[in-house]
Image: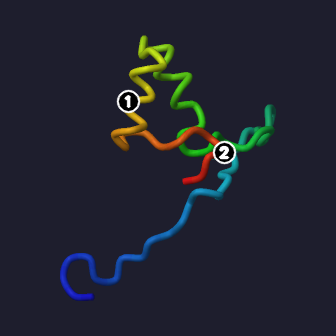
Amino acid sequence: MAGPLAGIRVVDLTSVIAGPFAKFSATPASVRLPPPRLGEHTEAVLGELGYRAEAIAALRRQGVIGPPEGEGR
């Protein structure tokens, strides 16, 4: 490929778990739980913002948000 995108690598980061970004000697950090999956909390967040189930379903049909967790991506 030539042009401005030549040489750019695409890396799949969907299953990468990052560790603590800082190290503290007195209170060491640790990773206790994996990060949420992409879109895992979408429905809950939209619900807290006042979106009703019908509106969230419409956003799914329009492709604005992905399918619920566990229904494939």
In the picture of the structure, the residue carrying the numbered disc 2 is 70
Disc 2 residue crowd, few under 14, some 14–19, many 20+, Cα 10 Å:
few
In the picture of the structure, the residue carrying the numbered disc 1 is 58
* Residue sitting nearer the eye, 66 or 18: 66
Q: Colour scheme in the image?
A: rainbow
Disc 1 marks which amino acid? Ala
Question: Does residue 37 appear left or right of residue 47 in this picture?
Answer: right
Residue drawn at (51%, 31%), measured in percent from left and top?
42
Q: CA distance from mark 2 to mark 1?
A: 19 Å
Disc 1 residue crowd, few under 14, some 14–19, many 20+, Cα 10 Å:
few
Disc 2 marks which amino acid? Gly
* Residue sitting nearer the eye, 65 or 16: 65
Q: Position of residue 67 (x, y in %)?
A: 52, 42
Which residue in the rendered view is the most extreme toward the bottom?
1
* Residue sitting nearer the eye, 70 or 20: 70
Question: Does residue 15 appear left or right of residue 61 in this picture?
Answer: right
**Mark 1: which secondary structure?**
helix
Q: Quadrant of residue 56?
A: top left
* Residue sitting nearer the eye, 21 or 14: 14
Q: Which marked residue is nearer to the observer: mark 2 or mark 1?
A: 1
Q: Are marks 2 and 1 in contact (CB under 8 Å)?
A: no
Quarter containing the C terminus:
bottom right
> Could you tell which of marks 2 and 1 lies nearer the N-terminus?
1
Q: Is residue 46 above or below residue 59?
A: above
Which mark identifies residue 66? Answer: none
Residue drawn at (26%, 76%), measured in percent from left and top?
5
Q: Position of residue 44 (x, y in %)?
A: 56, 22
Residue drawn at (43%, 20%), measured in percent from left and top?
54
Residue drawn at (58%, 57%), measured in percent from left and top?
14
**Total tally of numbered discs in the picture:** 2
